[in-house]
Amino acid sequence: MRLLLQTGSANAGEWRAAFAAALPEAEVTLWPEVPASVDYLAVWKPPAELFARVPAPKAIFNLGAGVDSLLRLPTLPASVPIVRLEDAGMAAQMIDYVTLAVLAAFREQAAYAQQQRAALWQPRPPLPRREFGVGVLGFGVLGRAVAAALLPFGFPLAGWSRTRRDVAGVDAFAGAGELPAFLARSRVLVCLLPSTPSTRGLLDRARLAALPRGAHLVNVARGDVVVEADLLAALDAGALAGATLDVFGDEPLPPAHPFWHHPRVTVTPHVSAVTLVDESVAQVAAGIRRLEQRLPIGGIVDRTRGY
Ligand code: NDP
Ligand code: OXD
């Protein structure tokens, strides 16, 4: 069996060694070398040229959770199944990142940092926990893991998804009709939506204005779900207290972008949950073995939905 690997990263050799160890029955080739025939592809943001040279593998494994960049490729073969990573060590990282951001907002860390810079000893009245709603927009593998991890803190939790997802202790909202009510109770809005034709630009001026005054946005999904100019306007007007942003419409975030130096914005370089080699290779190898045995696997992408 032949596996073609394209990672676009400096540690491609590490990936290749991990695949060779996890799938000793496979012949693993590293792009841009292409063997005479390819059974499986494992790729991350591949160049369009790759599919011109490998038109019909049995399946394409995406070395990440989000498939937006893959689905945008005009050369992507139409009928080949696409399999994305599910968790693969990313949920634990998302939990760390989002918990830190939620607690920083709840404990008003930015305001205290500003007071420290001014040598100002000024206790602020604590925010009532029961009024500090946390809404997880995109209640899938990662969104549900984050909500479950936040349960012990006692914030009123809600999740929003396309189809209703019931999780004990979390209020479930679904579909466009329930979005305004979900937003209205989200003092912190955590975005974990995939970037699809239905979600791009979703968080625009009107949706941001539906959040409670003083709300905080945490975007750990994709930059294009948020209309950045509308977010900046809401921050500048004081309608939003802050934003913790790990993802952007344009990455790397250009040096002149106003987010870099905005006093209410925290920027990180798309690191909230990185793809881990061993966990990802183990998941892909298990998937390939199941496909070879004609068994069903998780993580198959629905191209019409875009995730
Ligand atoms: P999932 O596919 O498991 O979850 C997606 C969730 O979004 C589901 O609950 C889905 O609803 C919901 N959803 C999708 N479209 C809509 C819509 N139009 N309206 C309402 N809800 C919608 O994905 P993951 O949890 O694994 O990952 C989420 C995203 O996080 C990825 O697509 C990726 O872009 C991003 N990500 C970012 C990383 C980073 O480092 N910054 C790392 C990993 C992922 P339903 O449940 O009904 O299907
Ligand atoms: C992903 C990512 O989608 O790293 O996995 O952004």
Image (cartoon, grey):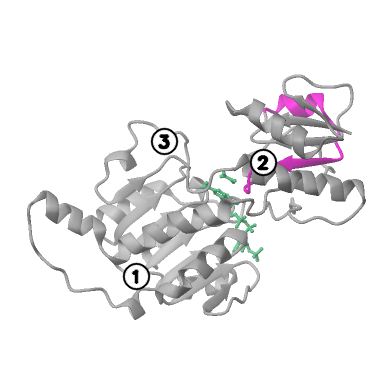
Q: Is mark 1 within 8 Å of ligand 1?
A: no
Q: Where is residue 262 in the image (x, y as percent from the top left)?
A: 27, 45
Which label lies toward us, 1 or 3? 3
Is label 3 in a helix, a strand or a loop? loop
Amino acid type for the residue under numbered disc 3 = Leu
Instruction: Please check the rendered image and state whether residue 62 is part of the magenta-colored stretch, yes or no.
Output: yes
The three-letter code of the residue at mark 1 reads: Pro
Give the magenta part as a residue range: 47-66
Please give the residue where the numbered disc 3 appears in the rendered image: 253
Quick one: quadrant of the N terminus? top right
Q: In this image, 266 relative to 7: left or right?
A: left
Q: Which residue is drawn at 35% across and 73% down?
A: 132
Q: Residues within 10 Å of mark 2 (few under 14, many from 20)?
A: many
Circle 3 Cα neighbour tier, 10 Å, few/some/many (<14 / 14–19 / ≥20): some
Residue drawn 27% across the image and 65% down it = 107
Image quarter for residue 172? bottom right
Residue positioned 26% across, 74% down in the render: 127
- Looking at the picture, tell me which residue is in the foreground, 109 or 26: 26
Q: Do the residues labelled 2 and 1 touch (CB within 8 Å)?
A: no
Q: Residue furthest right?
A: 293
Between 145 and 234, the one nearer to me in the picture: 145
Q: Which of marks 1 and 3 is nearer the N terminus?
A: 1
Q: CB under 8 Å between callouts 3 and 2?
A: no
Give residue 256's position: percent from left, percent from top.
Answer: 32, 32
Residue topped by disc 1? 212
Answer with the quadrant where ligand 1 appears in the image: bottom right
Q: Residue furthest top?
A: 33
**Label 1 – label 3 distance at C-alpha:** 28 Å
Question: Mark 3: is the Cβ under 8 angstroms from ligand 1?
Answer: no
Location of mark 2 (residue): 63
Distance CA(mark 2)–CA(mark 1): 37 Å
